[in-house]
Image (spheres, helix red, strand yellow):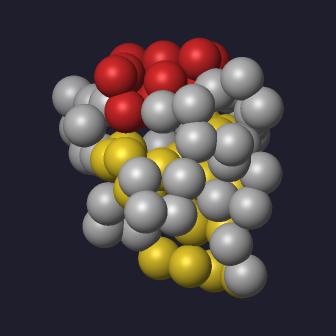
Amino acid sequence: MKVEYDRNTCTGMYQCTAEWEEFVENREEGKADLLESEEVEEGIFVREVPDGAEFDAEMAARVCPVDAIKVYDDDGEQIV
């Protein structure tokens, strides 16, 4: 499972940070940061979801008010 985060779309509501500790508040820039992620293109960050953190990653995606977070299963299908 992997998570994809579009930082350009993020509006800094920080709801994701309450759901998964891998999202942290960056108050200076008014955006969340996704820890241990790789920027695959400008503003798009991707990382694997560790075993046991699947529910938290999915909840972070579900609560994002601007749909800046997507979660994909191991087959590459978007599940959130």
Q: In front: 78, or 11?
A: 11
In this picture, residue 18 sits left or right of residue 16: left
Q: In front: 1, or 4?
A: 4
Image position of 17 with respect to 29: above or below: above
Q: Quadrant of residue 28?
A: bottom left
Instruction: Residue 47 in the image: state x and y as whole percent.
Output: 44, 61
Q: Quadrant of residue 18?
A: top left
Q: Residue at x 68, y 47 (%)?
A: 10
In this picture, residue 53 sits left or right of residue 60: left
Q: How many marks?
A: 0
Instruction: Residue 41 in the image: state x and y as whole percent.
Output: 71, 82
Q: Residue at x 77, y 32 (%)?
A: 66
Q: In front: 76, or 46?
A: 46
Image position of 61 with respect to 7: above or below: above
Instruction: Residue 3 in the image: state x and y as whole percent.
Output: 53, 48
Q: Residue at x 65, y 59 (%)?
A: 7
Q: Residue furthest front?
A: 28
Q: Residue at x 25, y 37 (%)?
A: 21
In this picture, residue 8 sits left or right of residue 30: right
Instruction: Residue 37 in the image: state x and y as whole percent.
Output: 41, 68
Image position of 64 with respect to 73: above or below: above
Residue 10 visible in the shown view? yes
Residue 34 visible in the shown view? no
Q: In front: 6, or 14?
A: 14
Q: Quadrant of residue 46?
A: bottom right
Q: Quadrant of the C terminus?
A: top right
